[in-house]
Image: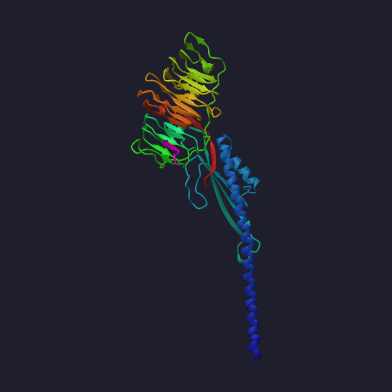
Amino acid sequence: MHKNSSSQKGQSLIIIALSVVGLIGLVALAIDGGNAFLDRRNAQNAADAAALSAAYAKISSLDYAAAAQNLATSNGYTNDGVASIVTVANPPGLGCDGYGPYAANDEYIQVIIRSNVDTYFAPVVGIQQIHNCVEAIARARPSYTAPLFDGSALVSLNPNACKAFRAHGNSSTTILGSGIFVNSNSNCGQGAFNHSGNARVESEYTCVIGSFSYTPGKVIPPPTHSGCEAVEYPPEIIYPTPQCADDATRSGNTWTPGNIDGSDFRGTMILLPGVYCISGDMTVSGHANISGDGVLLYLMDGRLHFNGSATFRLSAPDGSDPDTEDYAGLLIYAPLTNSNSLVFNGNSSSYFFGTIFAPASDVQINGTGDVDSYHTQVVAYTVDLIGNADTVIRYSDSEQYDATIPPSIEIVH
């Protein structure tokens, strides 16, 4: 019995020794694994920041690779080839996982950080270092020009109003070559898009973010949510900045461009090509006859009211004149600081060629009764189709204003 007991004690020592080795392994896993995890998190944060810094440098025409490396270095990843290796690629190559979804696209910049973390306890089990590989990809999209709001002919920008777009009365509105976009997300009973009475609206589409209320058969095709994507308000574009250095001058019925009071628009006016910076309300009525090709009417602070008894024949700059090439296709512009209304009561002899851009204003269109009066795009805070006269809006991108979209950066991976 005594010999048997001594043998069992020897076995216990072996078990204890093996347990100690196991405990050391667990400690190694806890400490060294924790250090590796912390390094991976730090490396990922550094890679994200470096990629964004590189993207910003790229759209600013600076050295994006240097910007990325400087940011990585400031976070402890110095690209010394021992503790860390930092790779910056534009366009991206294959990532840490061997996958390259943005390869060959030079709008994207890739930062890969490979780091080596020395272990403290893991060498007992033969692990001298733990290796991390992280990557970040940022998009550096340069500025570009594009049709306003994907070329919708009638646009209501109000993001949350009930009846942001109205069609009522006995009017008939036909849109050729485009459709309607209503940005309001309102789900009120009357609808963000509100149709009533005998009004008729026909276009390629009516796309509404929020609810809609309409009479079947009167809105063709019916309103839909499909394909709609809400836009921020105010829209993220580079807004026009027209300026007038001198006052407009008159010789007989002919006017040169410049600063002009809205009350001067009366009688017969022939507007020479250029920008007219209009202060105060512009109400044109009676038997006024206003005409001009290659003109931009810049409504700085007042409202606009075109009465049906007056005749208007106006077309926007076509881009051929260096003085107005930045405003090609822009006919009437009310900036965000001008929330006064714009009312169009044309007659069958009137026409408007070019974009009406009033992002903070209510725009009311009463029709002209002519099928060729509106070659336009109307972008407003709210839109109101009213009256008894028929309206035909013909949309062609070549005749309209293209907005400049500012550069942007974002992390995509």
Most foreground residue, 228 or 320: 228
Q: Nearer the viewer, residue 13 or 247?
A: 247
Depicted 155 relative to depicted 370: above or below? below
Q: Is 187 left, or right, of 123 in this rendering?
A: left
Image point (49%, 28%), residue name? 358
Outermost residue toward the top? 252
x and y percentages locating residue 24 in the rendered image: 64, 68
Q: Position of residue 181 (x, y in %)?
A: 43, 36
The tally of labels here is 0
- Using the image as rendered, state which of residue 287 and residue 143 is in the foreground: 287
> From where the camera sits, is residue 147 visible?
no
**Going by the image, does 113 lie left or right of 350?**
right
Seen in the picture, residue 223 relative to 284 is either above or below; the reply is below
Regarding residue 58, the answer to whether it shows in the image is: yes
The verdict on residue 193 being magenta is yes
Residue range (magenta): 189-194
Residue 322: image location, x then y, percent: 49, 20
Q: Quadrant of the N terminus?
A: bottom right
> Is 212 within the magenta?
no
Q: Indicate whether 208 appears above or below 277.
A: below
The chief SS type of the magenta part is loop
Q: Residue at x 66, y 86 (%)?
A: 6
**Outermost residue, bottom side:** 1
Residue closest to the eye, 22 or 405: 405
